[in-house]
Structure formats: C-alpha cells, structure tokens
Image: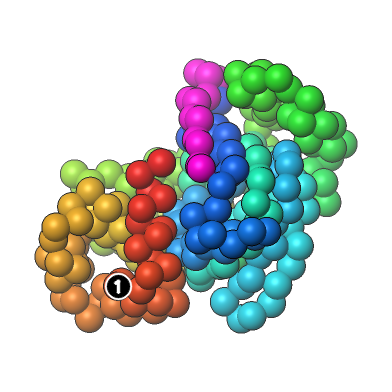
C-alpha cells in the first residue's frame, strides 16, 4: 500500500517551497518479497528528500547504481531513473519552486543536475540535525514544523533576492501563457537572450529550451493520467506537441521507454496518489 500526505508551506516560505510530502510504502505492487523497483521519468522539480526508514538504490540511465544517502538533494533530472527500495519505506520530501533552492542557499544548480547528492555535503551544520528531528517527529505536521524552522533561517536573509528572471521561469508553467518564445521570456526578465540563459541555468540547472521540453513532457503525462481514454496521438496534440513523433522522442529521452511500456503504465497509475 502506498499512502501520501501533502501540506502547503507557510506564507513566508511560499516563494521558495511548493509543498511538503510524506510517502509511506508498506506493500509491494509487483509481489516481490524484499524490494520494489519502479521507473521514474524525469520530473520537473528540485527536491530535498529524507528517507526516514528503509533503503533506496538509484540506477541512472547509464547503468550506474548508487545507494542513496538518508538525506539527499535531487537536482533537476533530465533522464529517467530506476528506484529500488525496501518493502517498507518512509520518505519526507520538500519540493522547491523553480529557482527556490538557489535563491535560499545560493548554490549553483548545475552542480546537482541529474544527480542525488548527500545534503550534508552541500549545506551547513543545521541540516545534519534535521534528519534526526524528522525521524523522531510523531506526526506529519510535526515534520513540516521542524522543516519550516530549518528553512525559515535562510528565508529571513536569502542568498539571492527574487528577480524578474525568476518570474519569467515561473511563467513557463502557466498553461494560459502557452509556450512563449524564449526571447520573449528574456524580455520579461529584462535580460539579453544570452544573459537570460546563463541566469536560467544557474538557477534551474538546465538550459531553458530543455526545461520547456520537460514541462511539456510532464504535462503530457498528467494529461494522459486524467484522460486515459484518449490515444497518445490525441495527448500529443492536446499538450502542444507538433506531432506524435516529437512526443515519442521525448519519451525516449526522459523516460527511456515507449508510452505503452508496462513500467510507464505503473508510473501513470501512481500519479493518482
């Protein structure tokens, strides 16, 4: 069984944090008695993840497998990963807004693109005690409270103030805005195209064109999950793809499987949680 709890950040942190999530896995969907392996296509997010119980291994698209540390910073993924975890697992996640982690802590995000890094090697000493506090917290609400206490300190005096480029990055998620040209987004940010790309990569970890593809791909996954009766061709046109072939190309890049692969179907089912 998979249970998920979510909570929104308090007002002072809403500019940086999207949500807090607690996930408990206590039963395996594939019947394997010791581990559970699932495909995770590249999402559009930067997350701080604490594993409170259980063990996790990550296999990257190049075949490299690592044992994930208890507390890890996940930069912007650009390829799929395979997560193999123990039968029982509890994980607490902080999902940051685009550029939110960079603005809070001032760490250039290309250092963490497509990787899981031990957060204790990235941030200063207070982050070391947060894992213990989360493990000992009796409720999800207490976990959120402890995390907000940790994040509130840098939020009082963030390393970087919010600038027009951060607003332009956020606009890429607005469905009413459509897929605006990057030079127009640069204009919103009051930067030249080259300055905009450099500032974008520093904050997000990937170039804006690749990020726009990631947003569209994940929008297609969400759309298909909400409209399972529609074909992938219909999904492609409904979510802004030029044709079906371009959607298939993104599946190959970001998920390394076809849309009809059984692992993808499992992932779409988990989007309901």
Q: Is residue 121 left or right of residue 239?
A: right
Q: Which residue is mark 1?
A: 260
Horizontal and vertical percent for residue 10?
Answer: 53, 19
Quadrant of the rendered image containing residue 146 = top right
Secondary structure at badge 1 equals: loop
Residue 41, relative to residue 176: is it above or below? Answer: below
Quadrant of the rendered image containing residue 253 = bottom left
Horizontal and vertical percent for residue 117?
Answer: 73, 57
Judging depth in this view, the residue of 150 and 1 nearest the camera is 1
Q: Residue furthest right?
A: 125
Q: Is residue 231 left or right of residue 62?
A: left
Check if residue 118 falls in the magenta segment.
Answer: no
Q: Residues within 10 Å of mark 1 (few under 14, many from 20)?
A: few
Quadrant of the rendered image containing residue 186 = bottom left
Name the residue: 82% across, 31% down.
Answer: 132
Residue range in magenta is 1-12
Quadrant where the image shows the C terminus: top left
Judging depth in this view, the residue of 117 and 187 nearest the camera is 117
Check if residue 5 falls in the magenta segment.
Answer: yes
Q: Is residue 259 left or right of residue 128?
A: left
Horizontal and vertical percent for residue 174?
Answer: 27, 44
Residue 31 appearing in the image: yes
Residue 148, relative to residue 17: is it above or below? Answer: above
Residue 189 appearing in the image: no
Judging depth in this view, the residue of 148 and 261 nearest the camera is 261
Residue 147, relative to residue 88: is it above or below? Answer: above
Name the residue: 48% across, 25% down.
Answer: 8
Horizontal and vertical percent for residue 99?
Answer: 53, 46
């Amino acid at each position: 069984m998979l249970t998920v709890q979510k909570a929104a950040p308090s007002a002072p942190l809403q500019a940086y944090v999207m949500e807090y999530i607690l996930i408990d896995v206590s039963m395996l969907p594939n019947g394997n008695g010791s581990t559970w392996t699932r495909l995770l296509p590249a999402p559009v997010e930067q997350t701080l993840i604490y594993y409170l119980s259980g063990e996790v291994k990550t296999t990257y698209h190049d075949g490299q497998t690592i044992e994930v540390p208890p507390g890890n910073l996940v930069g912007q993924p650009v390829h799929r990963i395979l997560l193999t975890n123990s039968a029982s697992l509890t994980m607490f996640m902080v999902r940051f807004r685009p550029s939110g982690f960079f603005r809070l802590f001032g760490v250039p995000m290309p250092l963490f693109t497509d990787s899981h890094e031990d957060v204790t090697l990235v941030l200063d000493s207070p982050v070391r005690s947060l894992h213990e506090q989360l493990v000992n917290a009796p409720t999800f609400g207490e976990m959120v409270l402890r995390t907000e206490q940790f994040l509130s300190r840098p939020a009082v005096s963030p390393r970087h103030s919010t600038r027009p480029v951060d607003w332009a990055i956020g606009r890429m998620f607005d469905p009413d805005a459509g897929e605006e040209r990057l030079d127009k987004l640069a204009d919103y940010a009051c930067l030249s195209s080259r300055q905009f790309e450099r500032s974008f990569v520093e904050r997000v970890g990937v170039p804006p064109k690749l990020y726009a593809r990631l947003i569209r791909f994940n929008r297609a996954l969400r759309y298909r999950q909400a409209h399972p009766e529609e074909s992938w061709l219909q999904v492609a046109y409904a979510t802004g793809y030029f044709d079906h072939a371009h959607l298939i190309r993104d599946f190959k890049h970001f998920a390394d499987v076809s849309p009809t692969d059984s692992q993808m179907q499992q992932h779409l089912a988990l989007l309901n949680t």
